[in-house]
Image (cartoon, rainbow, N blue to C red):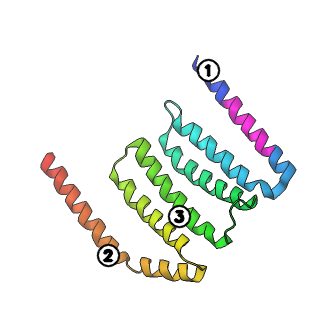
Amino acid sequence: MAEKRKSIGCLGRALLALVLALLFYRYGWISWGWWLLGFGIVFYASGLRTGGNREFLFPGTILIVIGFAVLLRQYQFVDFQLWRIWPILFGALGLGFIMVWSVHQIGNWALIPGGLLLFVSGAGFSNISFVRYQVWLRRIFDLWPLLLIFIVILLIVHFRRVRIKG
């Protein structure tokens, strides 16, 4: 029975690759959004199946979000400047961390980079130009010593809790 499921999974992946190859052959470079979306779905299918590796959800989320954004821009459902891809990328990374945390229950550590990346993404959408976004990012990243102090405090608190329990 396991061999039958495995062959169906391989057949589905081969069919998806064939469809993506036909799209690429027909539309050329315009089909990048479909490629990204298709590979994201493959990663999601591998991560969500029974006994699958849940870490595949992270790249799957990134590929699906970016592929969907590229398709929306390509088919002119949403018109945004090309520099807005950076906030979309940061948001996709943040959603990837949140997705892995919610499905895999690996601990609260994934919420910190996920929340930070979603914050950076939201700020990118609120700025009106790429130059202002870069200036804002520079101001945020100049505060890295405070972030380092915060991480050290979190580690100290965590190890004290572990030592008290153990």
Instruction: From the top left corner, tell me how far across and down residue 55 is, in percent.
Output: 49, 45
Instruction: Say what secondary structure mark 2 lies in.
Output: helix
- Report the Cα–Cα distance between label 1 and label 2: 53 Å
Give the quadrant of the N terminus.
Answer: top right
The answer to whether residue 151 is magenta is no
Segment tinted magenta in the rendering: 10-21
- Per the rendering, the mark at residue 146 is 2
- Report the Cα–Cα distance between label 2 and label 3: 21 Å
Give the quadrant of the C terminus.
Answer: top left
Q: Check whether the beta carbons of the residues at disc 1 and disc 2 lie within 8 A of each other.
A: no
Name which of mark 2 and mark 3 comes first in the sequence: 3
Which quadrant of the view contains residue 148? bottom left
Instruction: From the top left corner, tell me how far across and down residue 159 is, in percent.
Output: 21, 56
Q: Which residue position holds label 3?
A: 90
Q: Which residue position holds label 1?
A: 3
* Residue 97 versus residue 49 in the image, above or below: below
* Residue 13 versus residue 2 in the image, above or below: below
